Image: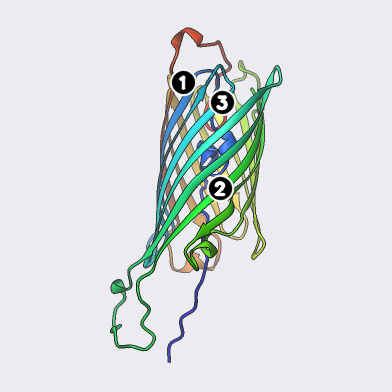
Amino acid sequence: MACFTVGYSQQEIILTKYTFNSLFFNPAYAGSHGWDEGSLNLHYRNQWLGLEGAPTTLMAGGELNMFEDRVGLGLTLAKESIGLESRLDISTNYAYRIDLGDSHLAGGLRVGGSFYGSDFSKLSNVEASDPNYVSDVDYKVFTTGVGIYYHSEDFYLGGAIPALVAIGNDPGAAYRQRHFYLHSGLMIGDEYASIKFEPSILLKYQKAAPLQATLGVNVWLIEGFAVGGHWRSSDALALSVELLLDQKYRIAAAYDFTTSELRKDSNGTIELMLGYNFNTSPETQRIKNIRHGGRF
């Protein structure tokens, strides 16, 4: 006898190099690169290599600073497949920025939609006449989220709820539970230091699951090149490399060593990232400290 039940295992996308673009979970991050500046990012993650039906994720996003550093606008797209299920997220992001002198404080709003689907034809040895056969599902969920983000040249602190309100066809809304994010990081070492350290932390909480912490540190060995180490509670240890070229082009890769029981059936996880930073008004270009990767 077989039994089917509804599960909501991995609702929010997991990233090791989340600092590459925090816009994917915090709308207040939009516009944080500075006056008339913006960024474009492409992020690919193949989780638990070798495990059939494991999550694969492709994400693209962009954000832009506008109206003399008062407003940030952003757009994110994410496609994730897990087993028979797939999910497409489209989110618009708005941030209002307040100048505090040597730092900024921003409040953000996210409006978007999530589109879930499943294809049970991929199952083997299942017939439509089987009393336990489950028909394909198609859920559409409208979401709104909020965030707050404070940053200076060498420190940031933010918090977000990407899906504060979720409305959709029943039981679609149940697929977007509230997740709470808290993230922070800093750069240790002045612009003339030969080695700089960039520690970061991400805390994620959902009432039906234990608090998950991700700790990481990038070590900038030479200008524009870093190696990193990362730890995600009850899940993985990871190594990463990151390269910044001409303060515009960013390339990064990470490999997770699974520490949970899934390590017996998988060969770890890979992430690949591409980024581009641009300025829409060259005449407003300011002299800045080297930002390296991530927030800076």
Viewed as shown, does residue 107 lie left or right of 246? right
Mark 2 and mark 3: span between their CA atoms?
18 Å
> Pointer 1: residues within 10 angstroms few (<14), some, or many (20+)?
some
Residue 247 - label: 1
The residue carrying mark 2 is: 144
Of the image marks 3 and 1, the number of the one nearer the N terminus:
3
For the C terminus, give its image quadrant.
top right
Residue in the image at 50% along x and 11% along y: 285
Q: Secondary structure at mark 2?
A: strand
Of the image marks 2 and 3, the number of the one nearer the N terminus:
3
Residue in the image at 61% along x and 29% along y: 96
Viewed as shown, does residue 31 lie left or right of 76? right
Identify which amino acid the numbered label 2 is placed on.
Answer: Thr
For the N terminus, give its image quadrant.
bottom left
Residue 71 - label: 3
Q: Secondary structure at mark 3?
A: strand
> Pointer 2: residues within 10 angstroms few (<14), some, or many (20+)?
some
List the single residue furthest toward the bottom: 1
Q: Quadrant of residue 119?
A: bottom left
